[in-house]
Image: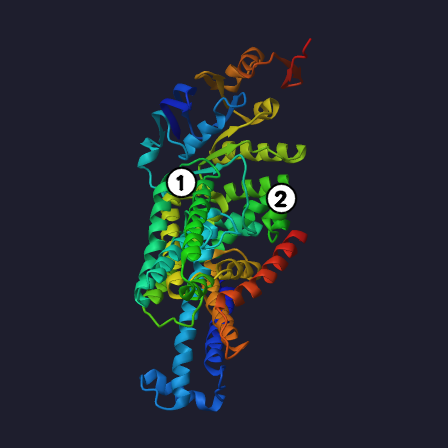
Amino acid sequence: MIRANNLQLRMGNRILVDRLDWQVAPGECWCVIGRNGAGKSTLLRTLAGLHLPEGGSVEMQGLILADWSLPALARERAYLAQSRSDAFGYRVIETVLTARHPYHADRYWEGSDDHQAAYAALQAMEVADLAERDVRTLSGGERQRVAIAALLAQDTPLLLLDEPANALDLAHQVRVMGLLARLCRDQRKTVVMVGHDLNLAHSVATHALLLMGEGQWRAGTVAEVMQASILGNCLGHPIESVQHGKRIFFIPAEET
Amino acid sequence: MRHRATVILAVLILLALASLLLAGMIGSITLPVSDLPSALGEVVRGTPLTMTATLLDLRLGRALTAFVTGAALALAGVMMQALLRNPLADPYVLGISGGAAVGALAAILLMCAAWMIDAAAFGGAVSVSMLLYFLARRDLRGGLAAEGGASLLLLTGVILSSGCMALVTLMLSIAPESRLRGMVFWMIGDLSGAQVRWLPWLVLVGSLVFALRAARAINVVALHAEAAATLGVRVGALRQRLFFCSGLLTASAVTSAGSIGFVGLIVPHACRFAFGPDHRLLLPAAALAGGAFLVLADTLARTVLAPQQLPVGVVTAMIGVPIFLFQLHHIRRK
């Protein structure tokens, strides 16, 4: 689906990611884990084509990103930014309808098929009742769900999400993660997300990419890399794992 | 949506025509409605013989210039606001009108002919735009720039604008008494000396065609800023075109009528308030409303203290300031 070849990302003189050779296959759900400033968002922006890598390349379906046309690429992958600023008072439904732009750039107004896709996405995120609201009047969590709904309405095989659980309450965190896992399992969609909640990530992800700092990284299945000692190393704080039934929980060790 | 837009635009077109008609009728001598059709016929044929027709010809010429100026300013305002993603930006905020003022005032100071004042104003506006483009080109091209990248362009524009204002003040302070009045009138914005020209109409129609074709993409950029690229919009190219178009519109408006304040701020704001921020409707609606607004403001400017004629910039500011303050506080309360 998408792969990184010998990818290097830098911020100033600091090397974030070095010699990253990484491949994501259809149906996989990846979680990118790392400390603040480790380069998670920069990596995701690079995959989305919003940041040019300092070295190496990113390929989508065998073609490097720069060779794709933007509209064609927009039908293949969707990107959820970490935060948004709403300068204008668009209605919720309008923001979701703009996600249909890559499909009908030649239309002036959206058609009924676009409206159907938009309403279905709003319903999936349980925000259909907000459709006529001004986005600037929404709460942080509502705005986040509307943004994810727009992502769903874009209806792409690859979803890149920068902290999708941001500002969501517990119930919606679980529901959004469950939805992403189902999309991967049932519709063979591919998800790459950045997240800070290890337990949430562990419950939905099939694979994880750990950014260890100073360019180091580890990639593998959840069972391989999401182990207390490796995670503790990655996040710079000792972590313990606890078994509860079939589930494993990670908790930070107490400072003594 | 489509239906609603058609209705709104049809109403606005009727409103614009009504404003032009009103501007033709009202003045030192009020023309009766019954004489209008025949007089209008004479004007259209290009042979105004009767007194009614002559008056109508004069007034309509001025009203049409007011219309094209107002439409250009409102359209430039919407574009600038979308470009900077700031609903409080106006076409003058980047100093383009300041450049025009420097050019025009220098020409007045040097006692140039009227057409040279226009040319100097246009030249000043274009030079400032080019300078701005050169200084902020990284920001304008930046489809890949970091979030919130519009601030470099905005700050550069504000600084250039204050530089131009300093030059203007310098010229005003050394100008001889006799030329001061003309300079001040130019600064406030005045339509009394304006003649009918084709260039502003060409610029307006060209920009409107571009704006309508790009309206969908403008919506995406207004919503998502740089991330609009992930929805298939070439952000850098679109921003450059928006900058170019709004600069050209402002330059052409400022050249025909001086710097008329508030039209480019109030009209887009009021339209967004009334019809919503969707640029597919907002762009043409603001152009029509801006044109009609300036025609009415100019009619007021030449009748309210007749035979004394006020500069139209004073009228737009008098109407604009309270409306703007009202809207601002109304939105805050919501």
Chain under callout 1 = B
In the image, B252 versus A61, the foreground residue is B252
Label 1 to label 2, Cα distance in Å? 38 Å
Which residue is drawn at the image coordinates 42% and 19% (left, top)? A15
Q: Which residue is mark 1?
A: B139
Query: As shown in the figure, which amino acid type bears the numbered disc 1?
Result: Asp
Q: Work out which residue is located at the far top of the displayed protein and give it.
A: A256
Count of picture labels: 2
Residue A156, image x and y in percent?
A: 45, 40
For residue A55, side relative to residue A150 (left or right):
left
In the image, B306 versus A226, the foreground residue is B306
How is the structure coloured here? rainbow
In the image, A103 versus B130, the foreground residue is B130
Residue A101 visible in the snapshot: no
Q: Quadrant of residue B91?
A: bottom left
Q: Secondary structure at mark 2?
A: loop
Residue B245, image x and y in percent?
A: 37, 55
Chain under callout 2 = A
In the figure, A10 relative to A98: above or below?
Answer: above
Which residue is drawn at the image coordinates 62% and 52% (left, top)? A133
In the figure, A23 relative to B259: above or below?
Answer: above
Within-10-Å neighbours for mark 2: few <14, some 14–19, many 20+ = some
Residue B102 visible in the snapshot: yes
In the figure, B91 relative to A249: above or below?
Answer: below
Q: Secondary structure at mark 1?
A: helix
Looking at the image, do the residues carrying marks 1 and 2 touch, with CB atoms under 8 Å apart? no
Q: Nearer the viewer, mark 1 or mark 2?
A: 1
Q: Which residue is mark 2?
A: A126
- Mark sitting on residue A78: none
Query: As shown in the figure, which amino acid type bears the numbered disc 2?
Result: Glu
For residue B330, side relative to residue B315 (left or right):
right
